[in-house]
Image: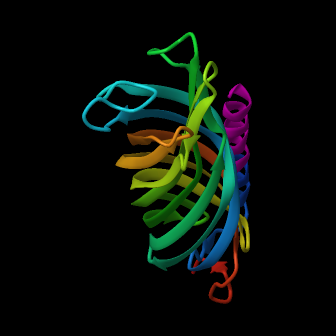
Amino acid sequence: MKWFRSFGCALVVAGTGLFTEAGQAEAQTYNWTGLYFGAHIGGAWSEATATDVLPPAGGYFTPTGNSFSFESSGFAGGGQLGYQHQFGNWVIGAEVAGTWADLNEKQVSPYFPASDTVSLRISPILTATARLGYSWDRWLIYAKGGYAGANVELNAFDSIFGVGLRNNDHWVSGYTVGAGLEYALFEGVRIGIDYSYIDLQSETLIASNTLGGDERFATEGQIHSVSARLNFQLSRPAPAYEPLK
């Protein structure tokens, strides 16, 4: 993800340059109040487990109580919609965001390595968060927290007997916390950098194998994501900003 780190550094440098130029011109106060929408692009990293919880002896692919562990990283991007209101320098708001992530790892089963492969995929991801920020003219720093959920898909396949999983995905809920920095380029257009930590709580996937037997796996995971953001403000007081008195 070297390209992403380079992009993030370039974004910060560009924003700092714009802020310096703005300071040399007439000082202005930007109004952050309003409805906005936008897009984000970046990278995500995840750690997840799927633990066999089928009593008494487990399912077809692993003895009960044993787990598959997955680590993956990849592209993540999507869109967001939110509203915020400014009180002096403080800015409060709420936002919903959807992210499509390339979080997918396939591996050889540690229990039956000669025949079995397993994989786990996390995508899409949905968050709904409250935000609290502090602004300095066209700069806004914020913290956020709230609900997070994702579709988790577990696949397993026995190449010798041709046995796989059916009904093998479910929605897993949890929470998210994070922080970010935004800069208003000009009226109604903002750029920023955002970090999110997502904790997907343990939930049981009830599936079946292609032989007709039951399978139950408790899945859980943690995700870290960093993204560059572009937002467009739809509604705002007129004028959006005005010279300081």
The quadrant where residue 117 appears: top right
Left or right: residue 26 versus residue 84 is right
Q: Is residue 143 visible?
A: no
Taking the spot 55% from the left edge, 39% from the top edge, the residue there is: 165
Q: Give the percent coordinates (x, y) of residue 67.
A: 38, 27
Callout count: 0
Residue at 34%, 24% (x, y): give it. 63
Q: From the image, which quarter does the C terminus lie in? A: bottom right
Q: Nearer the viewer, residue 207 or 45?
A: 207
Residue 88: image x %, image y %? 44, 76
Q: Residue furthest left?
A: 56
- Answer above or below: position of 237 versus 102: below
Residues drawn in magenta: 1-15
Q: Which quadrant holds the N terminus? A: top right
In this view, 237 is above or below 70: below
Q: Is residue 78 above or below residue 9?
A: below
Front in this rendered view, residue 103 or 154: 154
Q: Nearer the viewer, residue 205 or 173?
A: 205
User: What residue sits 54% from the left and 50% below the top?
Assistant: 167
Please provide percent x and percent y for residue 91.
Answer: 46, 71
- Is 200 displayed left or right of 140 in the figure? left
From where the camera sits, is residue 168 visible? yes
Q: Main secondary structure of the magenta part?
A: helix
Q: In the rendered structure, does residue 7 fall within the stretch colored magenta?
A: yes
